[in-house]
Amino acid sequence: MTLFSTYTFAQQAIRDSSSVVDSIKTILPDSLKKMEFLKLDTLTYRFIGDGNFTRGNVNRSLMVLRAEIIATGPVISIASNPRFTYGKQNGILAERDSYVDLFLDVFKKRKTYVFALGNLETSNLRGITLRVLAGAGIGYRVLNSSKNRLVLTNAIVHESTNFRELPTIGIQRNSFRVKGRHSFAKDRFRINHITYVQPAITDISNLRWNTVVSLEFPVNKWVVLRTSFENSYESVVEAARKRDDSRITFGISIGNKQ
């Protein structure tokens, strides 16, 4: 009787362990695929401080604080490039502008990938109390080497802008972007550039663009000296405000993003 009971218990234990193994074989691959899709295993970042100051007949101070943060995984990538600008001219506030964006890229490591984006923006310089933009598009990696990187993207976005004086404007735009990084002289200096061209879909005369070109001189793995030129244009502005703005700044960046 005892031998029979032991044999029965052993057989049951084998069946139970087999069912556990079968269960693992059945469930684990799906779980792994889900975890692989959501996995973010690399974080790169850098924090940038730029500015310029003049004293004399014109007293001007300008400070631009930026960050570049990217979390990447096998499938998805999340990036944000927040920015805050503060400037005075002859003691009068000119710029107190903020900008926050978020990019969600899918299959970013491939030559062609898709993405969604959204951003929030305020601008004392242009009299914008709040601008909201959201959309989706496709990207194409033209160059991807240690010396040269060049990415083209195109997206369809919806934009809503609340001006201080003008009525709120809601419009759809085509957003074309060129983004690149080029290294020279064994990475002794680099050129980074990003340009957006955003015409309205229903009215091409309603146009916005923004371009930033930076010349960078790495000091070491973490610290980079830099100078930047930025130009922006908006065809729809409030009265007494100019459509075009340009600035040159000098500064430093700190972080592990190269």
Image: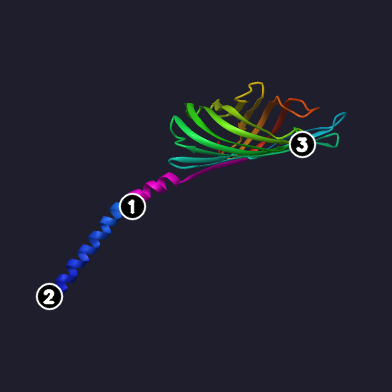
Relative side of 164 to 108, left or right: right
Relative side of 12 to 87, left or right: left
Report if the CB atoms under discs 1 and 3 are less than 8 Å apart.
no
Q: Which residues are magenta?
A: 28-48
Residue 217 appears in the rendering: yes
Which of discs 1 and 3 lies nearer the camera? The answer is 3
User: Residue at position x 11%, y 78% from top?
Assistant: 1
Q: Residues within 10 Å of mark 3 (few under 14, many from 20)?
A: some
In the picture, the quarter occupied by the C terminus is: top right
Q: Secondary structure at mark 3?
A: loop
Query: Along the line of sight, which residue is nearer the eye, 219 or 236?
Result: 236
Q: Label 1 belongs to which residue?
A: 28
In this picture, is 148 found above or below 121?
above
Relative side of 25 to 257, left or right: left
Give the CA separation, mark 2 to mark 1.
37 Å
In this picture, is 13 found above or below 37?
below
Which x, y percent locates residue 59?
Answer: 84, 32
Residue at the bottom extreme, as displayed: 1
Q: Label 3 belongs to which residue?
A: 164
Give the CA separation, mark 2 to mark 3.
90 Å
Report if the CB atoms under discs 2 and 1 are less than 8 Å apart.
no
As drawn, the label of residue 3 is: 2
Which x, y percent locates residue 11?
Answer: 17, 66
User: Residue at position x 44%, y 36% from top?
Assistant: 107
